[in-house]
Image: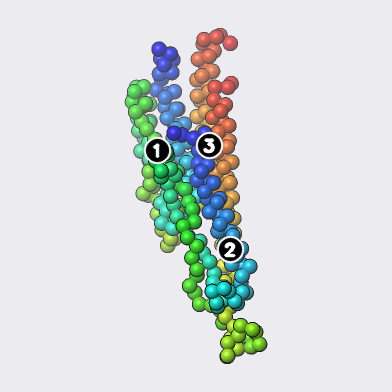
Amino acid sequence: MIEIMPGLDSAASALQAGKTRMEVIGQNIANANTTRTDAGGPYQRQMVRFETYLKDQMGVNPSSSSQLVRVSEILSDQRPPREIYHPGHPDANDAGIVQYPNVRVHEEMADLISSSRAMEANLAIIRTARSMALQTLNIGRA
Amino acid sequence: MIDGLFASANYEGVKKMLDASVLRQEAISSNIANVETPHYQRIDVNSTFGAELKRAIASNNFGDVNGVQPRIEVDREAVAQNRDGNSVQLEKELINLQKNMIAHQLQTQMITGKLTKIRKAITGI
């Protein structure tokens, strides 16, 4: 079946996935200087992984061709922590070295901007889908 | 019986083009949604659709036009621009989006024109 507003579900899924990504970026920036976590050691930078999936895999509407996106998993960045000489810090080791998270704020800002651009592109889809639906409803009216 | 009123190759052709516009909108929105998914291959309406429809309309045979069906397929010609294997280029997709919207507008107007003409022929106003 062809929907009245084509492409809406792909855009919606992308906005959802984009929101999760933004949350993870916010979490990374907030914890850029967290030296102690429940797991022990400094905070580890988190990353999202996107994956494509087909709408209606349950077979409700197998003729649809929309490819949706979702966050398949959230992974930890395995790069080593930053080591800074900071004697007197409560988390410093015997040599006075403190392990800071492997978060680089510049990287996070760049990711944030590209994420925000992707969101804008998806909103453009929603706008055009809306105007196409209005057009379609006006067929036959002089 | 009333089908005879609409059985023209041109009118059927416009309807097929409208179907293709809606499908293309779905394809573009899938591409934009997956702009950052690794190894995603962009999809589009099959590239042969335009030529097939043109040939069918030129033959002026209603049945031929009716048989042409747009469908979505993976665009094999698009190549990935960077190492994540994703072949979507956001700018191109946004341009296609605008083009598709204008095409859709044109097609709905053509259908409206045809319907208006028929109505005029029936009622005289």
Q: What residue type is labelled 1?
A: Ser
Q: Residue at x 46, y 34 (%)?
A: A2
Q: What residue type is labelled 2?
A: Ile
Q: In the displayed structure, does residue A12 sit left or right of residue B7?
A: right
The chain letter under disc 1 is: A
> Which label number is shown at residue A63?
1
Q: Residue at x 54, y 46 (%)?
A: A12
* Residue B12 drawn above or below residue B49: above
The chain letter under disc 3 is: A
The residue nearer to you, when weighing A35 against B105, is A35
Mark 2 / mark 3, whichever is N-terminal: 3
Which image quadrant for residue A59? top left
The residue nearer to you, when weighing B108 against B99, is B108
Q: Does dot 2 land on a helix, a strand or a loop?
A: helix
3D distance between C-alphas at marks 1 and 3:
16 Å
Name, please, the residue furthest toward the bottom.
A95
